[in-house]
Image (cartoon, rainbow, N blue to C red):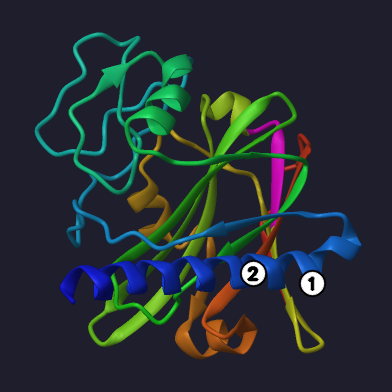
Amino acid sequence: MLFFTQCFGAVLDLIHLRFQHYKAKRVFSAAGQLVCVVNPTHSLKYAPTRCAAAQASTEQGILPPCHHHEVVHDPQLVPCTCPLFSCPWEGHLELVVSHLRQTHRINILQGAEIVFLATDMHLPAPTDWIIMHSCLGHQFLLVLRKQEKYEGHPQFFATMMLIGTPTQANNFTYRLELNRNQRRLKWEATPRSILECVDSVISDGDCLVLNTSLAQLFSDNGSLAIGIAITTSKVHSSEAEM
């Protein structure tokens, strides 16, 4: 009976995932957008202050890692940038993508415009939804995090990080857009480099920030669809409009 119950539960989860994917494809296919259903993951290395404050980058854009009392002895090596796990891996910047895919099983989606469909928004904080986005010859990391910035008041933070140097990141502009029930919310900014700490970006508020009521306003049956577009631009802008 226990085996049957576990199998039946797994089948129901698969049916639910396929249903969410079908709904998203039906909604966004008319716009020709690629849909990626992203399941939540509870962070295993969360702490209120995980990172030191971001320091000024060097000419190559190499910053210290996001862990206290750690030193990268080889300036050509960078620490693991996965915000979910405390990982001792270090390597060259060009190896970060393969490390995230192979070790941390983070999926990658290709296309200039995609839809990031985060499921199970009701789960308690801290929870992360993460995917890599490949376009314009570069790879980006999209992080959506549910976190209690103040006790008892969870918020959602969404940001796009370039897997590259800060200098390279300045050449791009990304847009996150929520659109539902004749309401639209848009955030447009220059992506931050993955060499900077995701936690610092979130604590600084340099990202799309949603409180619970606003997230519910744009969610559909516990899922939040975020349209993502990336363009090449030298103009530095950051705006949120509704």
Residue 161 percent location from the top left of the image: 52, 42
Q: Please state if 40 lies on the left or on the right of 118 as rendered.
A: left
Residue at position x 20%, y 50% in the image: 50
Height in image: 20 above or below 88? Answer: below
Which quarter of the image is occupied by the N terminus?
bottom left
Bin the neighbour count of mark 1 within 10 Å (Cα to Cα): few under 14, some 14-19, many 20 and up.
few
Q: CA distance from mark 2 to mark 1?
A: 10 Å
Any part of residue 240 in sight: no
Read off the residue under disc 2.
Answer: 225
Q: Quadrant of residue 225?
A: bottom right
Q: Position of residue 141 (x, y in %)?
A: 52, 42
**Placement of 77 over or under 193, stated as above or below:** above
Q: Earlier in the sequence, mark 2 or mark 1?
A: 1
* Quadrant of the image containing the C terminus: bottom right
Q: Is residue 86 left or right of residue 36?
A: left
Residue 223 falls in image quadrant: bottom right
Q: Nearer the viewer, residue 131 or 201?
A: 131
The span picked out in magenta is 170-175
Tell me, yes or no, whether the highlighted magenta stretch contains residue 173.
yes
Q: Residue at x 69, y 68 (%)?
A: 22
Q: Amino acid at mark 2?
A: Ala
Label 2 residue SS: strand
The residue under label 1 is 27
User: Which residue occupies the foreground of this view, 231 or 219?
Assistant: 219
Q: Residue at horizontal 42%, vertical 27%?
A: 57
Which of label 2 and label 1 is nearer to you?
Answer: 1
User: Is disc 2 in contact with disc 1, using a CB cutoff of under 8 Å?
Assistant: yes
The label on residue 38 is none
Q: Is residue 137 visible?
A: yes
Residue 62: which quarter of the image? top left
